Amino acid sequence: MATARRQIGYVSTLITESVPLMSYGTATGGSSSSITVSGQNYTLLTFTTSGTLTVTKAGLFDILAVGGGGASGANRSTAHAAGGGAGGLATTTMYLTANATVTVGAGGSGHDFGGQNGTSSFVGSSTIGSTEGGTSGAGGGGGITFADVGYTVYAGGANGGSGGGGQSGKSGGAGTTGQGNSGGSGASGGAEADRGAGGGGGAGGAGANGSLSAGGNGGAALDISSWLGQSAGTTYKAAGGRGARSSGSSGSHGANGTNNANSGDGADGGTNSVAGNSGIVYVRFKV
């Protein structure tokens, strides 16, 4: 039986026997560059903001989409700020005959009493999976703090492309299968202020659980270098944000997250809720 291919090196949602019957199309849009993948030349179109993929010849197009990262939580009273989940990272190959809208997902907004998930990135009228990142922590999807009225409510991390971290004994959010990973749980027991929050999940690994001495590390980013025709370890996307601890140390950023500066990274938990990073969409076709 034929199977679909979704590996980073070559991906397709089409039945494998169908692929040779179709040729690659051509298009313009975004920022254009030339790349070589496994000896094959491609044109790469990079969209860092939403725009139009102008199809000049119908055919196949390889897509790699990263959703917007989730916002972090904030430390309020004895609450613990969990890390935001990274945007999901999805790949596919689609056949296009006409122009298509490219939507680049926004990072979730940071609000101390209700941070948000990021939004999905996609090409055309259908999303490439659910690529939004999960929020977490005090004031985020993973826990809301009511410090002004004298009590605190803890909650788990929000689900998303990758899940947000959890607070004070609560579980992290779930990631989307094939696109991201779960967030870490918040620590329980001990003094309330010592309970480190979980780190947000990343496209390359789960967020770590918080402990009574530190917040959890954010989940690792995913190396997409081979898809871009680069040497391994050149380009990473979608790391999880680190969890924080009210009375002490935080975790670390998701591995290769470059201090949460990459597309699709979830935000770090801290004193204030911080917005997640926006996503990115790559479109490539053979030349």
Image (spheres, rainbow, N blue to C red):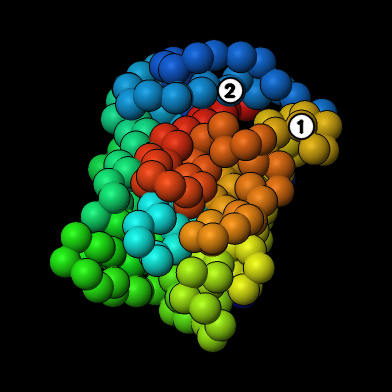
- The residue at 35%/61% (across/down) is 77
165 and 130: which is toward the camera? 165
- The residue at 37%/46% (across/down) is 273
Which labelled disc corresponds to residue 44?
2
The single residue placed furthest to the left in the displayed view is 149
User: Residue 126, can we see it?
Assistant: no
Which labelled disc corresponds to residue 234?
1
Which labelled disc corresponds to residue 194?
none
- The residue at 59%/58% (across/down) is 248
254 and 278: which is toward the camera? 254
Alpha-carbon neighbours of circle 1 within 10 Å: few (<14), some, or many (≥20)? few
Identify which amino acid the numbered label 2 is placed on: Leu
Residue 47: x and y in percent read: 45, 24
Q: Is residue 68 left or right of residue 93?
A: left
Residue 282: x and y in percent read: 52, 31
- The residue at 71%/48% (across/down) is 255
- Real-space Cα distance between discs 2 and 1? 16 Å
Q: Earlier in the sequence, mark 2 or mark 1?
A: 2
Identify which amino acid the numbered label 1 is placed on: Thr
Residue 232: x and y in percent read: 82, 38
